[in-house]
Amino acid sequence: MTEQIYKGLAGVVADHTAVSKVNPESNSLLYRGYPVQELAAALSFEEVALLLWNGELPSSAEKQEFLDFERSHRALDPRVRSAIDLLPLDCHPMDVGRTAVSVLGANHPLSEDSSPEAELTKAKELFAVFPAVVAYDQRRRRGLELVEPRQDLDYSQNFLWMTFGEEAPEEVVDAFRVSMVLYAEHSFNASTFTARVVTSTLADLHSAVTAAIGALKGPLHGGANEAVMHTFEEIGIDPAETREDAAARAKAWMEQALAEKRKVMGFGHRVYKSGDSRVPTMKQALDAMVEYYGRGELMGLYDGLESAMGEAKNILPNLDYPAGPTYHLMGFDTEMFTPLFIAARITGWTAHIAEQRANNALIRPLSAYNGPDERHL
Ligand code: CMC
């Protein structure tokens, strides 16, 4: 009998989820029923996190309670800081993020408590502390001291404050907030599915998140946002160049890359075939940053690559394409882009972990053996 193989599980519906709905036909993405564009236009990332975890928008009392909790759990645990300090400055920051979550799990008194209350507490704590991991890691790589969190700032303001040691302008905070909301959740993507597989064995939440970070690191998934910036860097970024010249160089680069059959990160998607629903909103945020920093030549590179890819292969950008240059303009080092994705996706992962636990079945597919026939020593 020849088994039907679904390579890469493409087209396989593995389970139900009430967390989000990706609809490639209408190019829409709903978090708990709400279009992500509406959420990005109107809500803080903290409110979106509560929506993903609880299924409903928070009341003002629930929101305030979470804001107080989040602000009081931002500081880096000294044990995590010591563990980070043991890691080499040239290791990938995703290794730092993965290690930090693992250390937090090993030290957590509720590590093995998988009751819904304990799981939600652990999820909220990870949400609150992860920005300090990213911020500290970028700073130590630049030879700078840790900046303590500030209670008077919201999540996005404080994230930027801890990273750069100065208050970010409103425009930058807003673009950052939008990126967090858009990156928060996307159904059964590779890292979320990884988190669900680990949860399905009844392992603890920190193990599931640590594994998810490993899955996110790859350039076919989260790592694409930094790969986009490496593409820009390979083409060459020259702030003095005109937008038109930059576009022409980018176009020529893309034609050459496609002729060499290279995969260009930031384009294409397993589910969306006529455009990623999140791109227009992220592109607006990028446009705002380009205008704020006066860097039209970056848009030249952006447009040149996009139009050449569209003309040659009709493959459209995914969220990582506008997110990469947005984070670059804000001042994040390229290798920090995927850890920023972790900070956002902790919400979606932990909402899926709770859903998996509430209605669990061990995830264990079959395989079709194609090795040697039975043989004997
Ligand atoms: N550059 C060049 N060609 C591409 C690209 C690309 N980015 N994406 C797809 N193609 C081509 C591919 O070469 C293949 O062509 P052919 O049929 O001639 O061999 C065809 O399109 C189908 O590609 P595939 O890789 O089999 O399709 P898939 O559904 O498995 O791919 C994907 C989805 C995301 C893995 C792929 O588009 C890709 O590798 N993109 C680049 C990585 C990337 O940007 N990832 C981020 C995804 S969205 C955010 C996230 O979840 O993290």
Image: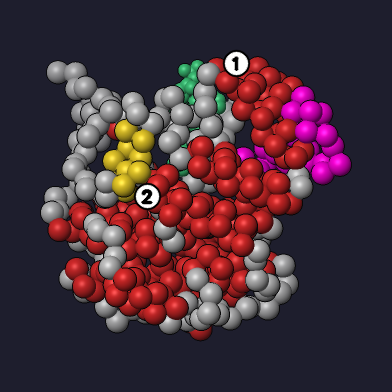
| Residue 220 image offset from top left, x and y in percent | 49, 38
- Check residue 299 for magenta coloring: no
Say what secondary structure mark 1 lies in. Answer: helix
Residue that protrudes farthest toward the right in the picture: 240
Residue 10 located left or right of residue 172: left
Residue 28 located left or right of residue 236: left
Say what secondary structure mark 2 lies in. Answer: loop
Q: Residue at x 66, y 34 (%)?
A: 302
Q: Is residue 71 above or below residue 200?
A: below
Q: Is residue 292 above or below residue 111?
A: above
- Return the residue at label 1: 312
| Residue 229 image offset from top left, x and y in percent | 65, 43
Q: Which residues are magenta?
A: 225-248
- Return the residue at label 2: 185
Choose between 44 and 231: the one closer to the eye: 44
Mark 1 residue crowding within 10 angstroms, few (<14) / some (14–19) / many (20+):
few
Mark 2 or mark 1, earlier in chain = 2
In this rendering, does residue 281 appear at all?
Answer: yes
Q: Give the image quarter of residue 287.
A: top right
In this rendering, does residue 209 appear at all?
Answer: no
Q: Classify the position of the C terminus by image quarter.
A: top left
